[in-house]
Image (cartoon, rainbow, N blue to C red):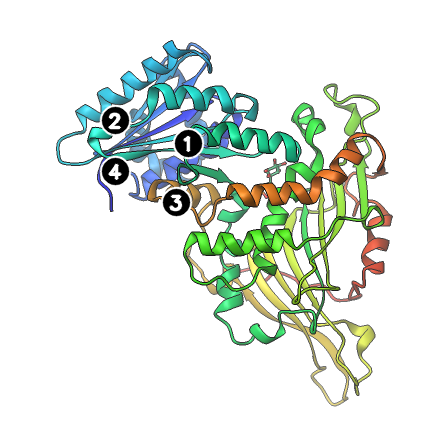
């Protein structure tokens, strides 16, 4: 593996994403020994004129909590010492020249042994400044080639607002950096059970013959949160739930559920298959969409009083290929709902010629619970234990908390940042993949923006509009009544 100096530059260092996700992930990597203090230096860059110490104070509280502070105390102060702050505007040569100087000084100081100059730029910034910032990085801050190594940039959604703006952004960045240098983060791809999808599907004989339209009735990919937009109303109102969750996070999950087996595990082979499945999705029909907006959403002073922005959506995607024709993929996401969870629910068809007459008791379902309480469980019908011959719904349950006691599941960002350092693009969105994802949703999004598809009000803390449940029923989803899987507790 590569050695030599590694500079991680967090642009937008005092923003929300940096404080809540980027720095904590870097700290955890450091704490686990993945970032060696002999090689690594971390730079924060932002506009505000603060000192190194002030930046450290701003982020310290996000790195440890009361419970682990004493264990991590030593690591914490070592980590904070690695952070240097440079202030400057996002479009000025002068600021980026100073940044380059700071990085170069560090590279020289760490050049004790042979090694390279690795520079990772993490853009924890709004996409409107991606183009100027990328330009500045390219002009002033790329690695010094005589040292070997690389320059990479990490960007995060929203990548544009529709197909056109996304393509524009892609070509602006693409004119400056090569695709292998660009890491588009979708943090759902860093979740443990999302990463498990390909193993599950392609390493288990049990699933191979069942995973198709002959056996599967419908697939649901669901995200719920039990809180509203909470202070992010201004951002959210411009985007809405489809751009915030469905077009990226849930669609990425859909790719992994629906794609064909890749030729190998090489990142390009995997991403090729994801693109193919996205390209097989046919245009979304208005009657297969239900939008909702929770009551009280517009009370946020940053949200216009007549906003039609959905905070909830159910949309049905149809994949027009040999494996999936006729199987609805139901993507559903909502804020201010009754619970907080994300799961994939694969519902199988009824048993033909059912001699037990147990159809109305429930169909087989295979559920992958992404969060919280990571688990996979398979709902099946068994004989009710006892003297009578009766059937009942039960489950085969693989709950991670129970099965993998003492194993701590890494945070999505931790894993993904490590991949950016190692140069593995498997869990990042490729440019053509992003384009295909926007192609699916752009016509619908434009109609919503024009007010041609309306959001139905729903109560906070509810299941969303009743129309969404009716749509599910129409699509053939059969809810199992009277049976709930209860995650085991230790
Ligand atoms: C972000 C969205 O991408 O994902 C947020 O912008 C959302 O609105 C968050 O709350 C959910 O992430 P997670 O990992 O908590 O499911």
Please give the residue where the numbered disc 1 appears in the rendered image.
Answer: 177
Q: Which is in the foreground here, disc 3 or disc 1?
A: 1
Q: What's the residue at 82%, 82% (across, down)?
A: 357
Q: Which is in the foreground here, disc 4 or disc 3?
A: 3
Q: Which is more toward the observer, 246 or 466?
A: 246
Q: Of the residues under marks 4 and 1, which one precedes in the sequence?
A: 4
Q: Of the residues under marks 4 and 3, which one precedes in the sequence?
A: 4
Q: Which is in the foreground here, disc 4 or disc 1?
A: 1
**Residue 232 at what x, y percent from top left?**
65, 27
**Residue 62 at what x, y percent from top left?**
46, 30
Q: CA distance from mark 4 to mark 3?
A: 16 Å
Q: CA distance from mark 4 to mark 2?
A: 21 Å
Q: CA distance from mark 4 to mark 1?
A: 27 Å
Q: Is residue 6 visible?
A: yes
Please give the residue where the numbered disc 2 appears in the rendered image.
Answer: 144
Q: Of the residues under marks 4 and 2, which one precedes in the sequence?
A: 4
Q: CA distance from mark 2 to mark 1?
A: 15 Å
Classify mark 4: helix, strand or loop: loop
Please give the residue where the numbered disc 4 appears in the rendered image.
Answer: 36
Q: Which is in the foreground here, disc 4 or disc 2?
A: 2
| Neighbours of disc 4 within 10 Å: few (<14), some (14-19), many (20+) | some
**Residue 482 at what x, y percent from top left?**
79, 66
Q: Which is in the foreground here, disc 2 or disc 3?
A: 2
């Amino acid at each position: 593996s590569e050695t030599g100096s590694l500079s991680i530059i967090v642009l937008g260092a005092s923003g929300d994403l940096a404080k809540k996700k980027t720095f904590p992930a870097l700290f955890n990597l450091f704490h686990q020994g993945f970032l060696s203090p002999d090689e690594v230096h971390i730079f924060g860059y932002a506009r505000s004129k603060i000192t190194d110490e002030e930046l450290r104070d701003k982020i310290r509280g996000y790195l440890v909590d009361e419970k682990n502070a004493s264990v991590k105390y030593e690591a914490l102060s070592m980590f904070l010492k690695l952070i240097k702050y440079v202030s400057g505007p996002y479009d000025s040569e002068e600021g980026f020249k100073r940044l380059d100087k700071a990085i170069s000084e560090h590279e020289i100081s760490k050049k004790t042994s042979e090694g390279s100059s690795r520079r990772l730029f993490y853009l924890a910034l709004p996409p409107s400044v991606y183009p100027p910032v990328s330009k500045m990085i390219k002009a002033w801050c790329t690695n010094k080639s005589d040292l070997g190594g690389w320059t990479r940039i990490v960007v995060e959604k929203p990548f544009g607002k529709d197909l056109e703006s996304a393509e524009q952004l892609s070509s602006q960045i693409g004119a400056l950096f090569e695709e292998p240098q660009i890491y588009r983060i979708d943090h759902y791809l860093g979740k443990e059970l999302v990463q498990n999808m390909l193993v599950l599907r392609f390493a288990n004989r049990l699933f191979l013959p069942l995973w198709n339209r002959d056996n599967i009735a419908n697939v649901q990919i669901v995200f719920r949160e039990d809180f509203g937009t909470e202070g992010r109303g201004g951002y959210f109102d411009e985007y809405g739930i489809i751009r915030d969750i469905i077009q990226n996070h849930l669609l990425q999950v859909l790719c992994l559920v629906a794609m064909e087996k890749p030729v190998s595990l090489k990142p390009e082979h995997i991403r090729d298959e994801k693109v193919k499945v996205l390209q097989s999705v046919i245009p979304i029909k208005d009657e297969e969409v239900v939008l909702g907006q929770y009551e009280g959403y517009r009370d946020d002073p940053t949200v216009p009083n007549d906003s039609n922005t959905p905070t909830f959506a159910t949309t049905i995607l149809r994949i027009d290929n040999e494996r999936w024709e006729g199987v609805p993929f139901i993507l559903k996401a909502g804020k201010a709902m009754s619970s907080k969870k994300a799961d994939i629910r694969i519902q199988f068809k009824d048993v033909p010629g059912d001699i037990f007459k147990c159809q109305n008791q429930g169909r087989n379902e295979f559920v992958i619970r992404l969060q919280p309480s990571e688990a996979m469980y398979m709902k099946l019908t068994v004989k009710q234990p006892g003297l009578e011959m009766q059937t009942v719904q039960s489950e085969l349950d693989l709950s991670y908390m129970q099965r993998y006691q003492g194993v701590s599941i890494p945070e999505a960002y931790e894993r993904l940042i490590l991949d950016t350092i190692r140069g593995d693009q498997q869990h990042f969105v490729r440019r053509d993949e992003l384009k295909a994802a926007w192609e699916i949703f752009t016509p619908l999004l434009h109609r919503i923006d024009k007010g041609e598809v309306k959001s139905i009000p729903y109560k906070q803390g509810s299941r969303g509009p009743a129309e969404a449940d009716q749509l599910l029923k129409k699509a053939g989803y059969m809810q199992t009544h009277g049976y709930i899987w209860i995650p085991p507790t230790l």
